[in-house]
Amino acid sequence: MPPDKLPPHRADIDLDAREWRPYVSKTGSHHIVPLSTQAVEILTNIHLLTDGGQYVFPSSRGNGQPMSDSAIRTV
């Protein structure tokens, strides 16, 4: 994932369309990133394991915050 797009928001991912659409403030539009079959499968499983909150990778502390950038990069 591009470092400036972390943490990804669940609303930016369309599993049916198999796309990640992060908003790019510099251009004022969404950047469309196609998702592989494997990525869709992983993201679907993550959704089932998490509370369905705003972030794809929520903090394990359960405080409604995203997992830190450094934690995501070490996985």
Image (tube, rainbow, N blue to C red):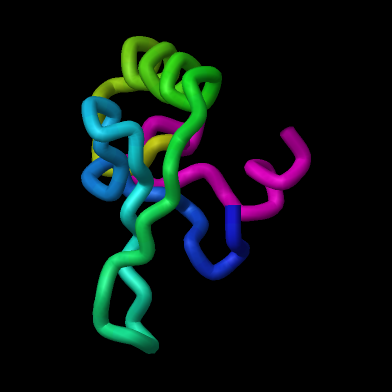
Asked where in the image residue 72 lies, by quadrant, the reply is top right
Whether residue 71 is visible:
yes
70 lies left or right of 7: right
Question: Is 61 contained in the magenta span?
Answer: yes
- Which residue occupies the foreground of this view, 45 or 33? 33
Position of 60 with respect to 69 (left or right) is left
Quarter of the image where one finds residue 43: top left
At horizontal 32% and vertical 54% (from top left) the residue drawn is: 21
- Indicate the position of residue 31 as horizontal and vertical percent values: 37, 64
Considering every residue shown, the one lying at the far right of the view is 74
The percent coordinates of residue 32 (x first, y second) are 36, 56
Quadrant containing the C terminus in the rendered view: top right
Residue 68 at x, y = what percent? 58, 50
Residue 10 belongs to magenta span: no
Q: Residue at x 37, y 46 (%)?
A: 20
Picture coordinates of residue 58 (x, y %)? 42, 36
In this view, the residue farthest toward the bottom is 26
Can residue 58 be seen in the rendering of this structure?
Answer: no
Q: Main secondary structure of the magenta part?
A: loop
Q: Which residues are magenta?
A: 57-75
Which residue is pictured at 45% across the width and 15% down the height? 41
When the figure is inspected, residue 47 is found, relative to residue 57, above or below; the finding is: above
Vertical comparison of 51 with 74: above or below? above
For the image, the number of numbered tags is 0
Of residue 61 and residue 11, the one placed in the foreground of this image is 11
Q: Is residue 19 left or right of residue 41?
A: left
- What residue is rendered at 47% in x and 52% in y? 7
Q: Nearer the viewer, residue 38 or 60?
A: 38
